[in-house]
């Protein structure tokens, strides 16, 4: 197998961060998984462009039932890391796990609309939101899928995604999420496999995992939800205070603290990246963020 890497020249963009700013952000931002990100970031200069994927399923078990507000940890981190950002919604990947095409299409359409609306409403520039089905028919992509070696079609497509974005979009950084200490339950597992086959074609950085109110499942993917009552969702009409109160009744007042701490970090990064929310309790500030994203 022969993979050809293309170099894409990107003009200097005013306000683009320097490498020192990037390293400081990775080292100091609470929403970044510091150790793995510092290990995975091998670029000698600031990134030109990045992408991250949004999965729709939890293995072969279930499709997502909404987009958690936790996804903003990845969106806001990406805004701090590179001037050009791409989101890939993994709809074709979900089909390989046996889900009905109509259900996958519905979930993917909702995720794409929500994310595109959010970056537009936040006045963020340099963003592209695409579905895997938008590119998986292209000759440049199908050739890569056939060439990549992996034990499962889902993994094969994950690896092909990385090479395709590197070749066709000039991506030099992939953003994922990582669960410290895990070997197989987060995106770092895909990235390790990529490096085994393709070396240092990309750098990798990670946010911390999302959270849930459920003490039996505190950590979760930032973009996947299997219990809408245990997550704050990025959707119009979501009542943050009411859902948090319901979660405290269901799980206990102390059980919700980890998620609340995570959401507080999301709001702080929003204030740093987009603009200051009005002062008040966390629920009110997060409600402002959701309102701005979904208006």
Image: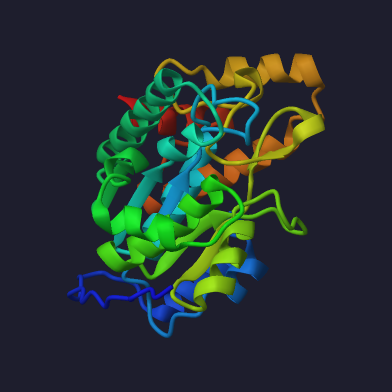
Residue 203: x, y in percent?
A: 48, 72
Which of 280 and 9 lies nearest the eye of the viewer? 9
At 50% from the left edge and 80% from the top edge, which residue is drawn? 42
At 53% from the left edge and 46% from the top edge, which residue is drawn? 154
At 56% from the left edge and 41% from the top edge, which residue is drawn? 222
Left or right: residue 109 versus residue 53 is left
Residue 267: x, y in percent?
A: 51, 42
> In terms of image quadrants, where is residue 31?
bottom right
Q: What count of labels does the image hold?
A: 0
Q: Is residue 170 visible?
A: no
Left or right: residue 126 versus residue 223 is left
Q: Residue farthest to the bottom?
A: 44
Assign the N terminus to one quadrant of the image. Answer: bottom left
Q: How is the rendered protein coloured?
A: rainbow
Residue 260: x, y in percent?
A: 66, 35
At 54% from the left edge and 66% from the top edge, which residue is drawn? 194
Left or right: residue 271 versus residue 177 is left
Which of 71 and 52 lies nearest the eye of the viewer? 52
Q: Is residue 22 visible?
A: yes
Which of 226 and 14 lies nearest the eye of the viewer? 226
Q: Relative to 77, say whether 263 is above or below.
A: above
Which of 64 and 292 lies nearest the eye of the viewer? 64
Left or right: residue 22 versus residue 128 is right
Assign the C terminus to one quadrant of the image. Answer: top left
Q: Relative to 22, say whether 85 is above or below.
A: above
């Amino acid at each position: 197998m022969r993979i050809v890497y293309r170099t894409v020249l990107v003009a200097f963009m005013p306000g683009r961060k320097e490498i020192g700013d990037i390293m400081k952000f990775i080292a100091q931002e609470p929403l970044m998984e510091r150790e793995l990100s510092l290990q995975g970031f091998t670029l000698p200069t600031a990134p030109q462009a990045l992408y991250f994927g949004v999965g729709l399923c939890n293995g072969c078990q279930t499709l997502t039932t909404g987009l958690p507000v936790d996804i903003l940890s990845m969106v806001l981190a990406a805004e701090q890391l590179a001037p050009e950002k791409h989101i890939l919604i993994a709809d074709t990947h979900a089909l390989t796990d046996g889900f009905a095409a109509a259900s996958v299409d519905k979930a993917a359409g909702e995720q794409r609309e929500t994310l595109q609306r959010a970056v537009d409403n936040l006045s963020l520039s340099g963003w592209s939101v695409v579905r895997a089905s938008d590119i998986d028919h292209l000759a440049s992509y199908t050739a890569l899928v056939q060439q990549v070696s992996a034990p499962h079609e889902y993994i094969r497509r994950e690896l092909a995604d990385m090479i395709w974005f590197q070749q066709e979009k000039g991506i030099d950084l992939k953003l994922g999420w990582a669960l410290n200490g895990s070997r197989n339950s987060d995106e770092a597992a895909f990235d390790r496999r990529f490096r085994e086959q393709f070396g240092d074609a990309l750098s990798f950085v990670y946010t911390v995992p999302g959270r849930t109110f459920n003490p039996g499942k505190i950590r979760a993917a930032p973009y996947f939800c299997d219990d809408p009552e245990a997550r704050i969702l990025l959707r119009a009409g979501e009542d943050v205070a009411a859902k948090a109160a319901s979660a405290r009744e269901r799980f206990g007042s102390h059980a919700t603290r980890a998620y609340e701490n995570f959401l507080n970090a999301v709001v702080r990064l929003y204030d740093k990246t987009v603009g200051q929310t009005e002062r008040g309790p966390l629920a009110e500030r997060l409600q402002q963020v959701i309102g701005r994203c979904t208006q």
